[in-house]
Image (cartoon, rainbow, N blue to C red):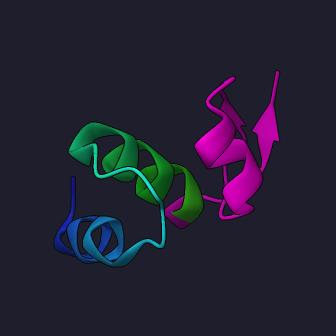
Amino acid sequence: MTPAIAALAKDLPLPQGDPFDRVIVATANAGSLTLITKDQHIVESGLVATLW
């Protein structure tokens, strides 16, 4: 984790407060990666490309 990813994770507009989910989403976002997940909060957020 980088300081930039930590800052992004802290400020993500996700409804759940799970810090691990926030770091995963922030990391995928920073790397322009597609996240494989069925977590509806993440999918519906539109913050990162998802696949499942």
Q: How many marks?
A: 0
Q: Residue at x 55, y 50 (%)?
A: 28
* Residue at left offset 61%, top offset 30%: 39
Q: Residue at x 75, y 52 (%)?
A: 44
50 horizontally vs 39: left or right = right
Quarter of the figure with the C terminus = top right
In the figure, residue 37 lies in which quadrant? top right
The reply to whether the magenta stretch includes residue 47 is yes
Question: Left or right of 43: which side holds 39?
Answer: left
Segment colored magenta: 30-52
Q: Relative to 46, is 14 on the left or the right?
A: left
Question: Residue 41 location, x and y as percent?
Answer: 60, 45
The extreme left residue here reads: 3
Q: Residue furthest front?
A: 15
Q: x, y (%) of residue 22? A: 36, 52
Please tell me which residue lies in front, 38 or 28: 38
